[in-house]
Image (cartoon, grey):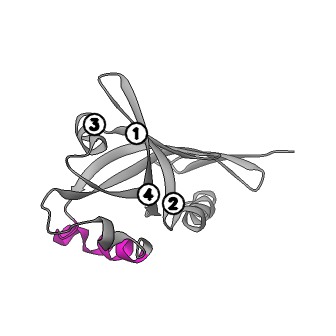
Amino acid sequence: MNKEFEKFNKKLVRQFGKDRNMALATSYEDVPSIRIVDTFYWNRSFYIVTHEASEKAKQIAKNKYVSLCTNTNEFQGEAYNIGHPLDESNKEIRDLLIDVYSNWYFEHNDESDPKMCYIEVKLTSANTLFNKVRYSVNFDTEEVISERLV
């Protein structure tokens, strides 16, 4: 990981490595849809807890390209249903999500429901503003372009 990207990633962890409400935009058959979701940033991805019957999960299954936005931060990525929370492959992220969402995780999620799932949004790009510095970031190449605003 290059140093500029590593510094930027640390900013993301500080800002979004906790329970954060964000607008999630999806699209199906060229019709956009947006809703507020709880997110958690970890390891170049945002994670969302949901149900396979939700509109967002259905739309993502048909079109993986999504955007997330909050205030002065916009992210684009590819979203995937990574399966049920109790899948062995989700053990590490489940432990993190239970901790991050400790105030409500079990109150609002029924892990006995086989249709409960996690959505991972693997980031491809970001346009953010932190402390009067605008960042344009490509996650694939780790290119970070920054501009100090006056």
Q: Are marks 2 and 1 in contact (CB under 8 Å)?
A: no
Crowding around mark 2 (Cα neighbors within 10 Å: few <14, some 14 to 19, many 20+) is some
Q: Quadrant of residue 31?
A: top left
Residue 59 - label = 3
Q: Amino acid at mark 4?
A: Asp
Which residue is farthest right? 150
Residue 86 lies within the magenta run = yes
Q: Amino acid at mark 3?
A: Gln
Give how far apart the Cα atoms at labels 2 and 4 are: 5 Å
Provide the secondary structure element on which disc 1 rests. Answer: strand
**Residue, disc 4:** 38
Give how far apart the Cα atoms at labels 2 and 1 are: 17 Å
Give how far apart the Cα atoms at labels 3 and 4 are: 18 Å
Provide the secondary structure element on which disc 4 rests. Answer: strand
Residue 91 - label = none
**Residue, disc 1:** 66
Q: Are marks 3 and 2 in contact (CB under 8 Å)?
A: no
